[in-house]
Amino acid sequence: MTMPLPLPLPLPLPQEPSGVPAPVLDRLGAAGYRAMIAGVRLGVFTALETGPLSVDELATTIDGDPAGVRSLVNVLVTFGYLRHDDDGITTAATPGPVDAELFWHEVLFEHWADIEDTIRTGTPRRGFYTWLSERPASGARLRRMLAGAAVDLADDIAAALPPAATVLDIGGGHGDHSVELCRRRPDVRVTVLDLPETVTALREDAPSDRMTARAGDYLTDDLGSGHDLVLLFNVLHGHRPEECRELFRRAAKSLSPTGSIAILDHDREPPSGLGPAAAGFLGMFDLTLWQGHGGGVHRYADLAAWLGEAGLTETRVVPLAASPLEKLLIAGRPS
């Protein structure tokens, strides 16, 4: 069977003076992305895991109309997701994990729906977690993504964190990182502090003898005292600079004399050598945070300065091989 070639564009592509196609390519890129999402939802990539298929065989496998499947395949071949040769259709470049692809598609095309109003006013019409609560499937995808990320980073994090007997996990959600830390550090006991709707649903595998859930608002409630280690993992990007500085001040007061604060987050200044895709992702993530609750990605240099204002001037940054855009920032008092 011969695969029909994609139709030519009806209009010539406008060119920039440099010879690079103008931003109309963004439209084409969006079309390729949307076609990939359609392929994920329809099970195209899963169907091809067992081997090459003809268009008709693929249509039968995913219960699709052959003409519609042929049109989708044309687009996916054009954008490099699929390959077609004498053996049939095969996967050329697999998308990312299904949960991640579907989650980000929903964020970009649903959560961003009124982003112009947020940018004009500085106030989201609805917060990210309100939006997420209305979409249980999206929330479940995010939960699986976060749990998987905690596993991927756990060994590096456990090896980098200083010795600690008592740990306060601020904004720790369902306890993903704390569960993994307890598995690797039998000496620690963790209190997870977060909003009631989150922290009351700690993971079922959380060790009940070493992990405690505490419901509260970490921006206003007492953080306790004598903690050897305070974790702020994927928390700060949800807050503006003034909130971060105040949280650092209060968290520092909750530490033991030799205690430390450990931050896990994205750095607004990505490591050199990662290319424009890294900056593009950080920009997308930053705008999503702004749309969701007025937050944003911070520079680690700024975080270190704000920690210094709180008296934690001994800082070190630990890169994480499993996630090059994230870093571990550990800060303590001068010895």
Image (cartoon, helix red, strand yellow):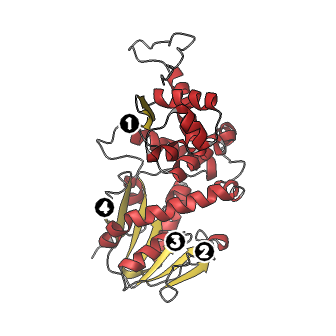
**Numbered label tally:** 4
Residue 129 in view, yes or no: no
> Taking 207 as reference, is 108 above or below it?
above
Q: Which comes before the other along the chain, label 4 or label 1?
A: 1
**58 or 236: which is nearer to us?**
58
Q: CA distance from mark 2 to mark 4?
A: 28 Å
Q: CA distance from mark 2 to mark 3?
A: 10 Å
Tell me the number on the disc at residue 170.
3
Does residue 121 appear to the left or right of 206 in the view shown? right
Does residue 24 appear to the left or right of 318 in the view shown? right
Tell me the number on the disc at residue 276.
1
Q: Residues within 10 Å of mark 1 (few under 14, many from 20)?
A: few
SS of the residue under disc 1: helix
Q: CA distance from mark 4 to mark 1?
A: 22 Å
Q: Position of residue 204 (x, y in %)?
A: 56, 78
Q: Which comes before the other along the chain, label 3 or label 4?
A: 3
Q: Residue at x 42, y 66 (%)?
A: 151
Q: Quadrant of residue 323?
A: bottom left
> Taking 333 as reference, is 242 above or below it?
above
Q: Amino acid at mark 2?
A: Val
Q: Amino acid at mark 1?
A: Pro
Q: Which comes before the other along the chain, label 1 or label 3?
A: 3
Q: CA distance from mark 2 to mark 1?
A: 37 Å
Query: Are discs 2 and 4 less than 8 Å apart at CB?
Result: no
Q: Position of residue 97 (x, y in %)?
A: 48, 51
Image quarter of the C terminus:
bottom left
Q: Position of residue 12 (x, y in %)?
A: 51, 10
> Taking 234 as reference, is 284 above or below it?
above
Q: Residue at x 45, y 52 (%)?
A: 298
Q: Position of residue 220 (x, y in %)?
A: 61, 71
SS of the residue under disc 2: helix
Q: Which comes before the other along the chain, label 2 or label 1?
A: 2
